Image (spheres, helix red, strand yellow):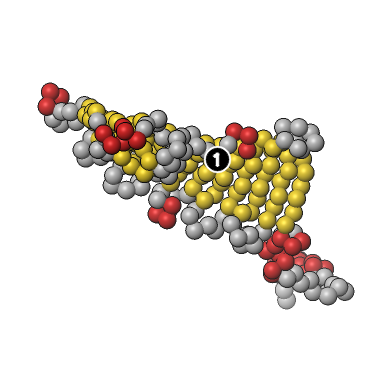
Amino acid sequence: MIQPQEKKRGGEHGEDDAAADNHDEEEETDENGEGGAAKKDEDVLDMPPPWSPKLFVNKDKFIDLCPNGEKTVFYKKCKVDFYAECTQVDGIVKRITLYEDFKRLIVQEVRSHFKNRKDNLVLRRRFPYQFKLVEHYDSSPSSHYWKKIIQIDGRVRKIYYYHHRNKDGLIYREEQIGRKTFERYKGREDKLIYRSVTFNPAWTETERRDKDLSIVDNHHVGNSHKGDSIIIKMTQKFDLDPDLPADNQIRKTEFNI
């Protein structure tokens, strides 16, 4: 015969087992519910295939960026021409024309941008009414490490060089056509920083016979003897070397011819 007290304890154990079974069933139900919801979401994300055919763009037309590889856009006092790469002989990709009037008749400046050129020219600025031309280059041995060139027809030509051009240290050269040519240097072992040659702009045949030094200047058109210039003076300037006494260093050398 089971004692009443033991029966009561057996009932408590049975209730605990039933509660544990119910808890396990609830967890399984939750897991199945989450898995089912995730599977349902995955099914929703699968879109049906499009009815239109697959899009195809020709590679050549995509590179052109515009019909026939050229496009022109007009702005206020400005016109911009776009060209596809490698379609023009000179490598131009964009030309910007600036005007002084609203009718776009008087040209103030023309800027041409280039790519894939052998001489690494990237920008050319032309001022028609000033007879001025400015060119910008990337660093390259094919362009003699030119950085920028400024030219005024028949008057001046200025050349800026990259500092790592050569061991000669040349960073700047200016040619005053028919009058003077000078160069500036930096970081040379002999401390040379300046060198110039002065010409006689108006010389005669008698002076030419008297002078020993003359050169051929292809830019000089100031007189009837085109291409010939007589040197009248040469100058060299040196920087101070801190490792040597200043009294024994040459600051300037001038040759009067």
Closest to the observer: 223 or 15? 223
| Residue 11 horizontal/vertical position (percent) | 74, 68
Res. 66 visible in picture: yes
**Residue at mark 1:** 133
Foreground: 117 or 9?
A: 117
Q: Residue 188: image x %, image y %?
A: 25, 39
Q: Quadrant of the N terminus?
A: bottom right
Residue 72 in the image: state x and y as whole percent.
75, 50
Residue furthest to the top in view is 247
Say whether residue 18 is left or right of residue 242.
right
| Rendering coords of residue 229 (x, y %) | 36, 38
| Residue 23 in the figure: left or right of residue 240 | right
Residue that appears at 31% across and 40% down: 214
Q: Amino acid at mark 1?
A: Leu
Which residue is found at the position 38% from the left and 41% from the top?
A: 228
Dot 1: what SS?
strand
Note whether residue 163 is visible. Answer: no
Split into 4 quadrants, where in the image is the C terminus? top left
- Indicate whether 28 appears above or below 105: below
Task: Pick out the residue farthest to the right.
Answer: 51
Q: Residue at x 74, y 62 (%)?
A: 68
Side (left or right) of 40 relative to 65: right
Which image quarter: residue 215? Answer: top left
Label 1 environment density (alpha carbons within 10 Å; few <14, some 14–19, many ≥20): some
| Residue nearer the viewer, 98 or 115 | 98
Q: Give the residue at the far front of this rendering.
A: 206
Q: Residue at x 57, y 55 (%)?
A: 115
